[in-house]
Image: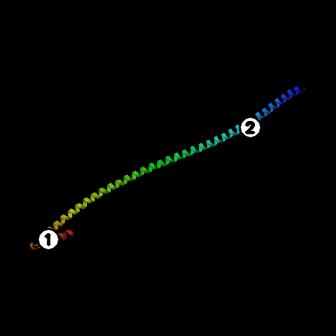
Amino acid sequence: VTIRRLEDKIISMDEEREQVVAAAVEEERKDLEHRLVERQEKDKTKEKDLQAQTKDLKAQIADLNRKHDEQQSAAMENLAELETTLSARQSQIDVLSEEVDRLTGQVAAVEKEKEQINAQYLDLWRKNYAQPSETADVKTVSKVVELE
């Protein structure tokens, strides 16, 4: 009786142990499955966030590239305008320089003409008013005439 009972008890304990092990395995499986689902959900959420960030960053990059292109275009336009302005000013400077050269030539011609007129006046004055004793005063008169 005892051996048979012991054998039944061993069988019963084996079955109970198998049930406990099966329950523990099932519980662990469910826990692992639950953690896997949570991890997958977190990963999906993280992936969506990263995709949204990537989309935002791409939009920002596109906007920055557009602004860069606009600013570069504006800079090129400003440079072209500056070059045009500088060229126009240089042309004005050249025209004014030519005008100054021309007027300088006219001033020199007028000065030469003035000197000739002064010399003619002095000669006429000498012929009409100077007497041989007054030749010493001629130098004084020529200086006075030149100063006029």
Q: Secondary structure beneath disc 2? A: helix
| Quarter occupied by residue 122 | bottom left
| Horizontal arrangement in the rendering, residue 73 relative to residue 142 (left or right) | right
Judged left or right of residue 95, residue 56 is right
Give the camera-side residue of 67 and 23: 23
- Is disc 1 surrounded by few (<14), some (14 to 19) or many (20+) residues within 10 Å? some
**Quick one: 41 or 61, which is closer to the camera?**
41
Sequence-earlier tag: 1 or 2: 2
Residue assigned mark 1: 138
- Which marked residue is nearer to the observer: mark 1 or mark 2? 2
Q: How is the image coloured?
A: rainbow
Q: Hey, what amino acid is under mark 1?
A: Val
Picture quadrant where residue 146 is located: bottom left
Picture residue at 27% right of the left edge, 57% below the top: 102
Whether the residues at callouts 1 and 2 have beta carbons within 8 Å, the answer is no
Where is the N terminus found, in terms of image quarters?
top right
Q: Is residue 50 left or right of residue 110?
A: right
Query: Which residue lies at the image location 44% right of the left edge and 49% below the top edge?
Result: 77
Q: Position of residue 90 (x, y in %)?
A: 35, 54
- The residue positioned 42% from the left and 51% from the top of the image is 81
Counting other residues with Cα less than 10 Å from the Cα at mark 2, is it few (<14), some (14-19), or many (20 or more)?
few
Q: Which amino acid type is shown beneath numbered disc 2?
A: Asp
Q: Label 2, on which residue?
A: 31
